[in-house]
Image (cartoon, rainbow, N blue to C red):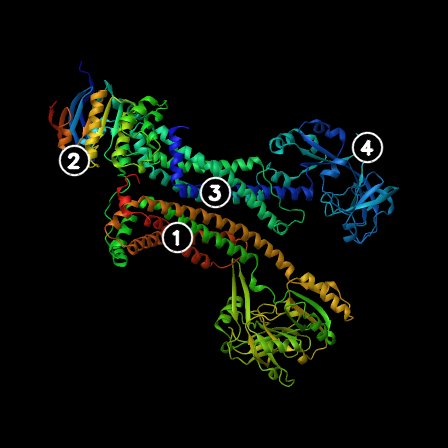
Amino acid sequence: MKMEILRVENLTKIYGKGENEVRALNGVSFSVEKGDFVAIVGPSGSGKSTLLHTLGGVDRPTSGKVFVNGRDVYAGNDEQIAIFRRRDVGLIYQFYNLIPVLNVRENMTLPVLLDGRKVNEERLSELLRVLDLTGREKHLPNQLSGGQQQRVSIGRALMNSPSIVLADEPTGNLDSKNSQEIVNLLKMFNREYGQTLIVITHDESIALQAKRIIAIEDGRITRDERIR
Amino acid sequence: MSIMNLLTRRTMGMNRVRTIVTIIGIILSTAMFTAVITICTSLYGALREGEIAQSGSFHIHAFSTNRETVAPALEDGRTEYAAFAKDVGYAVIGSENPNKPYLFILAADETFMREMPVHLTSGRMPENSTEVLIPDHLYMNGGVDIPLGETLTLDLGERTSAEFGSLWQNIGYQVGAEELTDTVPVRCTVVGKYARPDFEPYSAPGYTALTVMDGEPDADSAYEVFIRVKNPRKNYVGYSEEHTELYAFGSEDHSGLLQLEGVTRYGNISAAITNFAIILSVLIFAGSVCLIYSAFSISVSERTKQFGLLSSVGATHKQIRRSVLYEACALSAIGIPVGAAAGVGGIALTLYLLRGKFGDLLGSSYMSMHLAVTPACILLAAAIAFVTVLVSAWIPSVRAMRISPIEAIRQSRDIKAKESGTGRPRLAAKLFGAEGLLADKYYSRSRKKYRATIISLAMSVILFVAASGFCLYMTRSAASVDNRPGFDLYYEGVPADEFARIRSAAAAEGDEFAGYSVDFDHVMLYLPDESTTPEYRKYYSAAYGDSVMLNAYAQIRWMDDESFRELIKTNGLDEAAFFDPEHPRAIALNHASVPVYSPDTRENYVFNFLKSGVTSVSAVRVPAAPEGYEEDCVAWSGSVYGEGEITAYYSNDYARMNTLYDEMGRPKGLPTAPVIFEECEIGAMLEYMPVGAFPGSYLSLIYPVSQYRGENTDMSLFLRCGDTLGTIAALTGIMEDAGITVEQNRFFDATESARQMTSIITIIKVFSYGFITLISLISVANVFNTVTTNVALRRRDYAMLRSMGMTARGMNRMSNFECLIYGSRSLLIGLPIAVGVTYLVHLAADGAAHMSFTLPWAAMAIAVVSVFLVVFISMLYSTGKLKKDNPIDALKNENV
C-alpha cells in the first residue's frame, strides 16, 4: 500500500527585500511516499538546498506548507520544530558537520541524547556494523577519514529511525570510490529498512541510482520523473 | 550528565587557555568585589570600634533620672543593657586649673565599667566603694600627682550656687559663685588610673574619679542611665518613640554610633564609605562585565556552528541556553570561591602590612583596622560576581539563538562585507603592503568582534590614567615634597665653643650635618629687574600685584666654618673668597618653591631669584626714625612700582588710628627719608637646599660663622638622618658626655609630621595601585582572550594565505599592523576620555587643596606603551601557535 509521508504545498522562500529580493523557492508542490528514494537535481543557485532545509525544519518558508506524516511542520513553535527535527528528520551534510569534541558514539547518538532517551544499543551496534565503524566508537572526528566521517553523519541521521533522511550533496566532498560507497549505503538503507531518502546532488550518476528524480531551476520544479 | 553538559565540558577542555583566562577573570572580579566589601566592612568596623572605645556602646543617655521613671524601658525585651552611674559628690583637690578645682566621684555599676569608655592606664579596676580610679588628666591638666595605693580623705559635698541651686558636671565652674555644701569626710584608696573619659564634659568642673556602686540602684536616687538597644537598625526608632520616660529629665542620643550602626542615614562618614564602595564596585563591575562578557561572547560565537549543528539535529533553544549557563556555573564554581578567598586574603595581608598606619588616617589612637568578614559580605560579593557572570553569559547566548541553524552552520553572519572607506586601506597598503591591506580588511569586517578588545583596552587606559591622577593629586595635596625642610632633626643651643667637638662626635649619627648660629637676621632687598629671573618676577607680581611696597627680603644666617668649608668644597668654590673679614661674601640659596594662594587657586611657584652671574644684591637700610615716629614701610614714592624713589615712610599711633594713608597704603603727609643701600657681595649661588636650610620665599644668604659679629654664642646642630629617635638618644649621650645639659624639648624632629603624611600617602598609594593592578590584569586577560580567539578563528585563512605563498615575515607584518590598529584605536578612544575623567578627579581633589591641573604624563606614557605591549604579546602568542600548523591540514579540516 502506498503511503504519503511528505507533502509540500506551494512552498515559497524569499530572501532579501525590494531590489535584492531573491525567490529561492517559487511555489513548489510535490509529495513523497514512504520508502521512496528521491534525487533532487539542479544547477547551483536553483534553490535545491533551500528546499531541503525547508523540508528538514531548519529554514522556515516564507509561505506554503510542509506536512510530514500528515502534520504541519511549521505550525508549531521553535521548540516543537526542534523536537520534530530530532525525531522525524535525519540530515546529512556535504561537510559532515560532526561535533569535534564528541567521539563517534556520542556524535551518532546525539539526537537520542538530546531527546533525553536511552540509547538503543542494539540499533547502535547494528548501525556501526553496517557503516563499518565497529571499533571506532571512541574515535574523535579528526581521527577519521572523510568517508568515515560521512558514515558517522549517516549513522547520526539514521539513529532515531526518522521518517525521512535528507542528504545535501552527501558525496560532494569525497573521491569517487568513497562516493560510491556512501551511495551504496544509502541505497541499502532504502532497500533493506524502507528508509525514505531525499538526496540533493548535481552528480548525474548518483541521481540515476535513485527511484525518482525532481529537477529544480529558478525555484520551480521543471521535471519530476520516476525512473525505477 | 546530560549530553549538552558533556559537550560543554569537552568544548571548555578543548579551549583550555581561554577557559583558564576566563576563570582568572572571574577570580579577579570576585576578588575585587570581595576586597571592596571587606574593606568597607572593616572600615565601618574600625570606625564603630573607635566610636565605642571613645564614647561607649550606649544608644541613649538619660540624664539624672531615677529607677522608677525608667522602669518601662528596663523591662522592655529590646533593651540590651542599662548601665547606671550615680554622682557621689565633689571635693576640692588643689588643681592648678582654675576652672576645674574638684575631684568628682562617680559610682558606676558593673555594666557601666564594661560598656563605657573606661581605659585603665595603670593599676587595677576598683572592687568596692572605697576604691577609686583617678583620671590621667588630674595630673596632666590639673598638676595633682597622686600615687597608686594612696588613701585619700576627701570632704565630699554638693556644688550649690545661690542663683541655680544644685549644680552638676554639665555646668561649668561658677567662679566665686558656688560652694560645696553638706560635706562629709570620705576615705578612699586610689587603685588605678584611667584615660580621660569621654563622658566627662570638657567644661566639667571636676576630674571624674570612678568607684563601684554599692548594691543595686535604688528607687529614689538620681542616676545617669545609659541604654543600649538590641538590633538597633530594626528596633531603635520604635524604641525611642515608645520610651518617652527616658527623656523625662533630658537625654542625649549617641548619634555618632547610631550613624555607624546604620540607624540614622545622614552620617557623612557612612555616606563617604558607601559612595567609595559604590564607585569602585561600578568600575569593577564594568571591567568584569567587559572581560567575562567578551570571554563568553567569544565562546558562544566560536560555538555558533556547534549550536547550529545541535539545533539541526533537534536541540531546543532551552537546551542550548542551558548549556551556556552550565558553562557559566562551572566557571563560577571554580572562580568565585577562589576569588572570594583571594580577596579576603589580600585585604587581610594589606591590613596586616599597613597596621599602625590607619591610626594616622582615621585620626584616633583608639582605632585600628581589623579584618571584618561576615558570611553575608562574602555571599554578597559572590552574588555580585555570579550576576556578572550570568549577565555576561546570557546576552551572547540569546544572540546566538537568533541565528537560524543553517546560517550558523555556514557561519555566514560572521563576515559581512561592507564597502570600507577608500583612504585608509590605501595608506595601510602603502605602509604595510598587501598584508597591511588584509589586516585592515579583517579589522573593518569583523569590527564587532574586536569591539570588546578595543573597549577593554580603552577602559583600562581610562582607569589607569584616572587612578594615577587620583594618586598624584592626593599625594600632592597631602604633602608637597618641595616644601620639606632640608633637615630631619635639629638641636637648638649647643654652645659655640663646644660645637666643633660635638660636631665631630656626632659625625657618625647623621648622613649630613651643619651648624648654624641660632641668631639670624632679615634684611630688606631691592632686586632690580636686571638681576632677577623672569620666573621670579612672575612670582612677585602674582604674590604682590601692583603694590608699590618693597617685598623682597633676604635671610642672613651663619654656618659653622667646617660645614661651610665642606659646602665650598662640594661645590668647587674658592675657599679664600669667603673668609676675608674685610670683605664678607655670602653663598646665596637661589632656589625657592612658594605657593601663592588666591580665593580659589593655589599655584606653586618654583624659581631662582637671581640671574646667574649676579655678584651682589642691595640691602635696604632704613635710617633711624625721627623723634615721635617709627618705621612704617618702604615703598616707591611714585604711583606704580618702580616709579620715583625707594623711600622709607614713618608713622606713629596717631597716624595709624586716624588712618592717614594714601590709596597705595603709604602714610600720607608724614616724615619720609631716602633709604640707604648696602651692597651684599655674593660669592656663589646654590640651587639646592643644603642641610639646615628652610625653603621659603626669602633669598638666603649664608656666611661662615667666623664672620658673625653678633653676641649670641649658641649654635644649632642640623642633621639629615634615617632614624631620628635613635639619633636623638645618641646625641643626648654625646652632649651629656661633653658636659652640656640636654633639654629634650630643644630637639626638633622634622620627620614626625612628615611621617604621618607618609603613612597616609602610603595607604592611598597601596589601595590605588592595588586597584590599578587588578583592573589592568582584568584587561590584559580580556585582550589576550579576544586576540587569541580571533586569530584562532582565522586558522584556515592563515593556512590559505600561507598556501598562496605568504611568507612568515608577511604574516608578522600583517599581525603587527593589526596590533597597530587595535592599539591606536583603543588609545584614540581611551586617552581623551581618560583626560576628561582625570579632570573630574582633579576637581574632586581640588576641594581639599588648591592646585593647578596637570595630567599624569608618566601614567599616560605607561598606558600607551602597555597597550601596544599587551596587544603585541597576545598576537605573538596566538600567531606563534598557528605557525606550527601544516597549512594543508588546516585547510582540509572543516571543523575549525
State the residue in front, B463 or B850: B463
Question: Are the numbered discs 2 and 4 placed on the same chain, yes or no?
Answer: no
The reply to whether the C-beta atoms of the residues labelled 1 and 4 are less than 8 Å apart is no
Q: In x, y percent, where is residue B30?
A: 49, 41
Closer to the N terminus: mark 1 or mark 4?
4
- Give the chain of mark 3: B
**In which image quadrant can residue A203 be found?**
top left
Q: Amino acid at mark 4?
A: Gly
Q: Which residue is mark 3?
A: B29
Front of the two marks 3 and 1: 1
Closer to the N terminus: mark 3 or mark 1?
3
Q: Amino acid at mark 2?
A: Gly
Q: Please tell me how crowded label 1 is: few (under 14), some (14-19), or many (20+) other residues with Cα within 10 Å.
A: some
Is B419 on the left-hand or right-hand side of B633? Answer: left
Q: Which residue is mark 1?
A: B873
- In the rendered view, tell whether residue B764 sits above or below residue B1: below
Q: Residue furthest front?
A: A135
Question: Are the numbered discs 1 and 2 placed on the same chain, yes or no?
Answer: no
- Give the chain of mark 1: B
Front of the two marks 3 and 2: 2
Question: Are the numbered discs 4 and 3 placed on the same chain, yes or no?
Answer: yes
Closer to the N terminus: mark 4 or mark 3?
3
Front of the two marks 1 and 4: 1
Distance of label 2 from label 4 (alpha carbons): 104 Å
Q: Which residue is mark 2?
A: A45
Q: Secondary structure at mark 2?
A: loop
